Image (cartoon, helix red, strand yellow):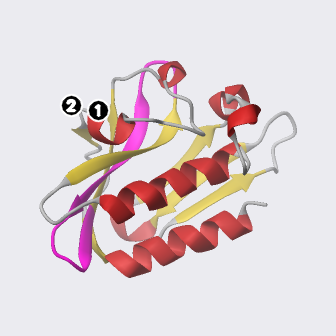
């Protein structure tokens, strides 16, 4: 379903790998802004904190509500996953971006980014998919354990 991992095969830097094959999402993103997070506010590493934020926000969303989960922090935009609770048991996921600059959000503590986005642009090279809520949340919990 969803993959979030670190690619350490490049000599000079590591990259964040983000994939949702069913939605045609296949990204490799720079981790620069993850290194600027305030470590005094963290219990986990910054990427684990971000995935934990995803779990918390996804767990709180009600039917017919939506929010945005940031993943790609760039200078001019933030790549994010739009999540809509379409039924009690299902989410609709769509990948795209917001023009909110990546340097304005702490990846380990995105705060109100989940509800703040008002300029989401769907990535036309991807597809929206419907996923089971519990399957999505369980996958995110598993990802946290693999990011040690």
The segment highlighted magenta reads 74-92
Q: Residue at x 66, y 58 (%)?
A: 5
Q: Nearer the viewer, mark 2 or mark 1?
A: 1
Which label is found at residue 2? Answer: none
Question: Which image quarter holds the C terminus?
Answer: bottom right
Badge 1 crowding class, 10 Å Cα cut-off, few under 14, some 14 to 19, many 20 or more, is: few
Image x and y of residue 99, in percent: 33, 23
Magenta residue check for 90: yes
Q: Residue at x 22, y 59 (%)?
A: 84
Image x and y of residue 23, in percent: 34, 64
Magenta residue check for 18: no
Residue reaching furthest left? 64
Residue linked to disc 2: 118
Q: Is residue 134 above or below residue 5?
A: below
Q: Residue at x 56, y 65 (%)?
A: 3
Badge 2 crowding class, 10 Å Cα cut-off, few under 14, some 14 to 19, many 20 or more, is: few
Q: Residue at x 85, y 33 (%)?
A: 12
Report the side of 52 relative to 82 (left or right): right
* C-alpha separation, residue under disc 2 versus residue under disc 1: 6 Å
Q: Are marks 2 and 1 in contact (CB under 8 Å)?
A: yes
Q: Under tag 1, what secondary structure?
A: helix
Say which quarter of the image contains residue 143.
Answer: bottom right
Image x and y of residue 115, in percent: 28, 39
Residue linked to disc 1: 116
Image x and y of residue 32, in percent: 68, 29
Report the side of 33 relative to 59 (left or right): right
145 and 11: which one is in front? 145
Report the side of 75 relative to 32 (left or right): left
């Amino acid at each position: 379903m969803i993959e979030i991992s670190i690619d350490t095969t490049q000599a000079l830097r590591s990259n964040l790998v983000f994939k949702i094959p069913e939605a045609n999402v296949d990204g490799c993103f720079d981790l620069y802004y993850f290194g600027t997070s305030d470590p005094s506010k963290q219990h986990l590493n910054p990427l684990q904190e971000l995935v934990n934020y995803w779990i918390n926000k996804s767990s709180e969303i009600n039917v017919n509500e939506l929010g945005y989960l940031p993943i790609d922090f760039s200078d001019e935009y933030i790549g994010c996953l739009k999540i809509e609770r379409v039924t009690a048991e299902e989410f609709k996921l769509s990948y795209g971006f917001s023009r909110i600059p990546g340097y304005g959000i702490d990846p380990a503590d995105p705060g109100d980014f989940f509800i703040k986005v008002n300029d989401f642009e769907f990535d036309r090279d991807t597809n929206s998919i419907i996923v089971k809520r519990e399957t999505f949340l369980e996958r995110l919990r598993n990802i946290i354990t693999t990011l040690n």
